[in-house]
Image: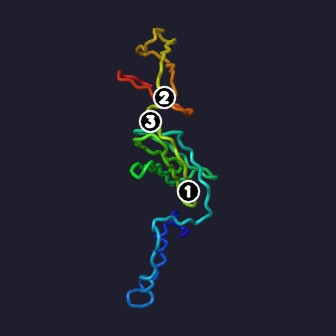
Amino acid sequence: MFSDPAPRLGEVFARTKIHFIPYSYSPNVYRWHQFALNLLGDPAMPVHTDTLSQLMVRKPLRIRTGNDLALFIVLDRNGPVPDATVAIYQDSTSVYTGTTGTDGTAAILTGFTQAGTVRLTVTAQNHRPLRDSIVVASGHSVTLLNYTFLDSTGDGNGCISAGEAFAIRLWLKNNSHLPLYNVLCRLTTDSPPAHG
């Protein structure tokens, strides 16, 4: 049981009976042993093999309705927690899960259809479960209000000419009622070729 990185109750229980299988072919106490000992409970329940540690999670402030990629980092007092299960759920039909890698990070693609609050549960071997919540917001969190091309190193006409280096100044509006951090913008074009 202690050599298994994540033992389950059903597996541990079955192992206690394996030793007696060869002695159970004839009617005797060992056969009754096999029939009489039964697990009353969830066989998939994890068996903890150490003192339980407290989990911490870095989570997004909000998740957008529709397809959105949510990033979670699961930590304990020693650093990142690998193989933790992260579950986000709004009701029994909207459940999204992921497992952390060696860096403690889980990226979960969500598809919530309704705005509101969703539940977050994080579990890991030898850790207390963590329960939290996240806001699901509809619409875009950021709107582009205006932009300006800065081509002062080029011909200065305010357009991006072929072979010209330029910068773009953006004016953005935060449409949510919460602060935004680490806002990223992606520049695309349908006028090839463009190189970044």
What is the number of the mark on residue 138?
3
Residue 49, quarter of the rendered image: bottom right
Disc 1 crowd rating (10 Å Cα; few below 14, some 14-19, many 20+) is some
- Residue furthest right in the image: 77
Q: Name the residue at 52% across, 28% down.
A: 174
Location of residue 112 with respect to 180 vertically, above or below: below
Location of residue 178 with respect to 34 vertically, above or below: above
Earlier-in-chain disc, 1 versus 2? 1
Q: Name the residue at 53% across, 41% down.
A: 60
| Place of residue 87 in the rendered image (x, y in percent of width and height, measured from the top left) | 47, 51
Earlier-in-chain disc, 1 versus 3? 1
**Label 2: which secondary element:** strand
Q: Is there any visible trace of residue 103 in the rendered image?
A: no
**Amino acid carrying mark 2 in the image:** Val
**Label 3: which secondary element:** loop
Disc 2 crowd rating (10 Å Cα; few below 14, some 14-19, many 20+) is few
**Amino acid carrying mark 3 in the image:** Ser
**Amino acid carrying mark 1 in the image:** Pro
Q: Is there any visible trace of residue 25 in the rendered image?
A: yes
> Is residue 34 found left or right of 73 in the rendered image?
left
**Label 1: which secondary element:** loop
Cβ–Cβ below 8 Å for labels 1 and 2?
Answer: no
Q: What is the distance, in whole Å, between disc 1 and disc 2 at their CAs? A: 34 Å
Q: What is the distance, in whole Å, between disc 3 and disc 2 at their CAs? A: 12 Å
Location of residue 113 with respect to 168 vertically, above or below: below
| Place of residue 22 in the rendered image (x, y in percent of width and height, measured from the top left) | 41, 84
- Residue linked to disc 1: 129
- Residue linked to disc 2: 142
Q: Name the residue at 44% across, 87% down.
A: 30
Location of residue 120 with respect to 179 vertically, above or below: below
